[in-house]
Image (tube, rainbow, N blue to C red):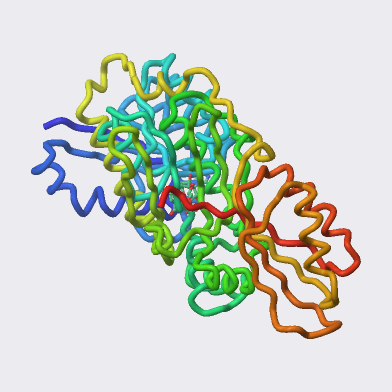
Amino acid sequence: MKKIRIGLLGLGQIGSGLYEILISKKRQFEKQLGVSFEIVRIAEKYPNRRRKVRPPQSLVTKDAFDVVRDPSVDVVVELIGGTTFSGEIIKTAFKEGKHVVTANKALLAEHGDEIFELAHRMRRWICFEASVGGGIPCLKALREGLVANNIESIYAIINGTTNYILTQMTETGMDFAEALKGAQKKGYAEADPTLDIEGVDAAHKLAILVRFAFGGRVKFSDIYSEGITRISSDDIAFAKEFGYVIKLLAIAKKSKNGVEARVQPTLLPKTHILASVNQSFNAVMLRGDETGDVMFYGRGAGPHPTASAVIADLMDISKRDIDGPVDDETVIRALGSEIEIKSITTILSRYYLRFYVIDQPGVLAGISKILGRHKVSISDMIQRERSVGKVVPLILLTHEAPEKDVRAAIRVIDRLSFVKGKSQVIRIEEAGS
Ligand SMILES: NC(=O)c1ccc[n+]([C@@H]2O[C@H](COP(=O)([O-])OP(=O)(O)OC[C@H]3O[C@@H](n4cnc5c(N)ncnc54)[C@H](OP(=O)(O)O)[C@@H]3O)[C@@H](O)[C@H]2O)c1
């Protein structure tokens, strides 16, 4: 029976989940897949810390470099996270002739060129299914099932924390701060939730998807990202009145006009299939030129779903000749020339605009005039009952307009004396529905 000897780095949430499955299903994998996965070394930063799993102490070291330099290890599974130390350790693993499996989206999004180049140069495998969509096998689908297609677009909900928060806000009417607190209590949000709520985690995953869907290098800083911290319960309620829900979408589109890639809160028609992806679930919708839309739905995070994707990668590696040199076509394609991502200011979109204004004559005319002057035309509006002299919300939906014109108009509107606070601007996507 083929043996794959694993050096496991990190015994946190995912590392422990992986350990549990590899131990509990060892016989099943041997019987069904004909491969024996053996964890031969484990690195833990604090070996004495109480953990969910208790591997034999003889396997454990404090020094991750002991693991990557151990001649008995075939595959290093990096589940530490971060970019600095994990980058160093993965590069060392390649130089030591090891194959690598990682779930580290931040590292691959921000330093992918360096990591993929080294994997290619050292002729080792790098596998990272768990880095996007946790248990959802969307990268494998891109690589294999959709190979006949040119991918035209990606619409994805790939951050469970923000999807959970927006679902709570939508279903209960609670505001963002309260929904975030609830998410933290339930373990769906970290104590420091910045990377999730500011859209950075979703942007990391989108960078990886774009790279493998469109084939080429991606500069992470070119991906525009906007989080959900400014979404209010009012916005969610008004969107609903227009027939939309608000979702944090990762969007990429490729056309003859170039490539767009961004993470943004989005008004999505409530009839759209992604609108019913709720709670902490994730979904990735890919449009191939041959298949049309294909959607993957499931748990985008969590110890067991994510470890499931890590094991799929280990399985892939076990099917290959692990001792010979590697030519990974997928990595070669992803090292192609840089994909030029259009600046956000050059895109065309429809917009939801929400203003808080003093209720007085001429307000709507004043705002419409400024929008008109910037060639932004209104398609729909909600103006609350009159409450003269008080601050009331005014909501406008626009026809398609260039982002730069909308931004210029909003800059002028925000300076009007009857406009209170910063205006809200949310893009609307019909997302091919
Ligand atoms: N959590 C998810 O649902 C999820 C989903 C998809 C992908 N991922 C990715 O999976 C990776 C791991 O995430 P996680 O949630 O499992 O993180 P985690 O719970 O924080 O676990 C990280 C582990 O790495 C250990 N570690 C840190 N520095 C180390 C070092 N120098 N040597 C050895 N061990 C070290 C930590 O040890 P101590 O406990 O002793 O500090 C901790 O056990 C990250 O890249 C993350 O982005 C996570």
Can you tell which quarter of the image residue 42 is in?
Answer: top left
Give residue 28's position: percent from left, percent from top: 13, 48
Q: Nearer the viewer, residue 392 or 296?
A: 392
Horizontal side, residue 218 vs residue 312: left or right: right
Q: Nearer the viewer, residue 26 or 103?
A: 103
Give residue 190's position: percent from left, percent from top: 55, 61
Asked if residue 192 can be seen in this view, the reply is: no
Q: Please determine whether, in this image, residue 117 is positioned above or below residue 3.
A: above
Give residue 228's position: percent from left, percent from top: 61, 60
Determine the residue positioned at 63% across, 60% down: 397
Tag count in the figure?
0
Determine the residue positioned at 58% across, 70% down: 236
Horizontal side, residue 427 vs residue 375: left or right: left
Determine the residue positioned at 56% across, 68% down: 239
Can you tell which quarter of the image residue 330 is in?
Answer: top left
Q: Residue furthest right?
A: 417
Image quadrant in which the N terminus is located: top left
Q: Nearer the viewer, residue 36 or 379?
A: 379
